[in-house]
Amino acid sequence: MNEMNENPLDLLPEVLLAASAVLGLLLGSWLPRARQWLVGLLAAVACATGIVAASVAAAQPATTAFGEAFAVDPVTSTSRVVVLGGTLLVLGISFRPLRGDARESEFYVLVQLAALGALMMAGTQDLLLFAAAYLLASIPAYTLAGFRKDGPGTEAALKYYVVGALLGVLMLAGITVLYATGRATGYPMLGDAFRDAPGALLAVGAIGLLSGVLFKAGGVPAHFWVPDAVQGSSPPVAALLTSIPKIGALAALFRLGDVVFADSTLPWPALVAVLAAASMTLGNLGAFFQQDVKRLLAYSTISQVGYLLMPVAVAGRADLAQQALLYYLAAYTVTNLGAFAVVCALPRADSLDDYRGLAKERPLLATSLVVCLLGLVGTPPTAVFLGKLEVFGAAFDGGYAWLAVVAAVNTVASLFYYLRWIVPTVSGSGSESLADGDRAARVVAYVAAAVSLGLGIGGGPVLDVLTGPITH
């Protein structure tokens, strides 16, 4: 084991976010309702400062903090930037709807805590720390799902919590079995112990662990909560639920596959590949005939998990796996949040038909929506297009050509339901649902669409930054 390193500066982005959440909770108790927005501003400053700190740390050699419990490597650094950047976008689409709310400061604090849990999941190298990070990412999200305290929000929070509690218990049981099998909780030691471990015990423990991780990611078979929770929660919360937790969960899953299960007797790559194919296929089938825009995006995010699981399946087997996952995470996050920003900008437009004539009424917003929707398909020159090329290449290099073929078929099929949203957007005349909107959310939509295009056009230098050894 490495020499104990207890320097808190190694976790500076996480420390900044935690300190901002605590300070924001205190400020919210003293500030008048008209000035609760200052807590949101503090959260935005913490996220921006954290991005700078993460970028500085990314330029340093990979290391571990607090022994080997937390890794600071390209996976962690990229996840930090993507999570904090995504949180900034979520805050941007939340200011207007939350302005003057009696619990405005609590909302911003809960968003930061959920993001902090995702950050910790992405960098942890210890099963016990992972369990703590999972709970930190989950409990604030349950509260946010029912934040509006109306019927749909209460139903969303209840379904989200019940499924999360069940799968969380299964995950803890799986961690217990893995600890009993490997007699350790640190990933490097478990990786050595699992080389000769009994296959049956490994399978039971890995399936239990997977149940919790897939719940946070929203992948099959732990996806049942996604459509109802996303539809019932407010649009800013739906944007958060479909993006921020996924980053931490998938980064953690990649690390588990590369460090813990890579040399074990468990057929880990095949298991994750099957889950990837199931997620992308069932997500697309569920989205085909949806009319509610949030529910359509909910099924879309399930299908996107399938593509994101492809490089996870070949972790340690393909050189492209790491950069493919990290780039796709960044591309998906900004594109998905851009689509949700449009939904937030038009709070009275709930169904696909409500967007009819948007191009005539608000051409720039319609352009942003079309860019994001075509980006989710994987249309050049958007970032997701380059991300899909990378994950397809990683699947081929890792010996899973069949998975790349399944992904290509699903990509073509997904164009159908995205076009069902695009066609009314660019045709017809505007309706009353497009008459007003959230100006801040429109700005976020413009920024997200621009970043999605910029990231796709300038993807080469970004991909070069994402290479580097993962810490063992």
Image (cartoon, rainbow, N blue to C red):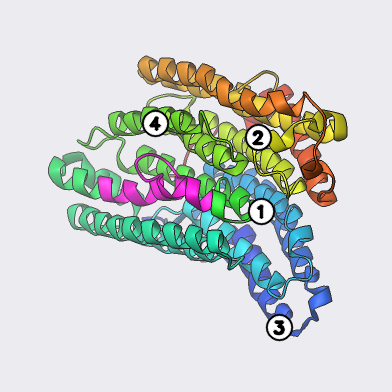
Q: Could you tell whether 175 is left or right of 373 in the image?
A: left
**Sequence order check, earlier mark of 3 and 1:** 3
> Does dot 1 land on a helix, a strand or a loop?
helix
Q: Which one is nearer the viewer's eye here, 430 or 37?
A: 430
Q: Earlier in the sequence, mark 2 or mark 1?
A: 1
Residue 212 belongs to the span the image colors magenta: yes
Q: Disc 4 marks which residue?
A: 276
Q: Is residue 209 visible?
A: yes
Q: Position of residue 206 (x, y in %)?
A: 26, 46
Residue type, label 3? Ser
Of pointers 4 and 2, the one earlier in the residue sequence: 4
Question: Was residue 268 drawn as part of the magenta stretch in this picture?
Answer: no
On the picture, is 405 further left or further right than 80? left
Which three-letter amino acid code belongs to the residue tagged 4? Ala
Q: Which residue is mark 3?
A: 29
Characterize the local packing of mark 1: few (<14), some (14-19) or many (20 or more) Cα atoms within 10 angstroms.
many
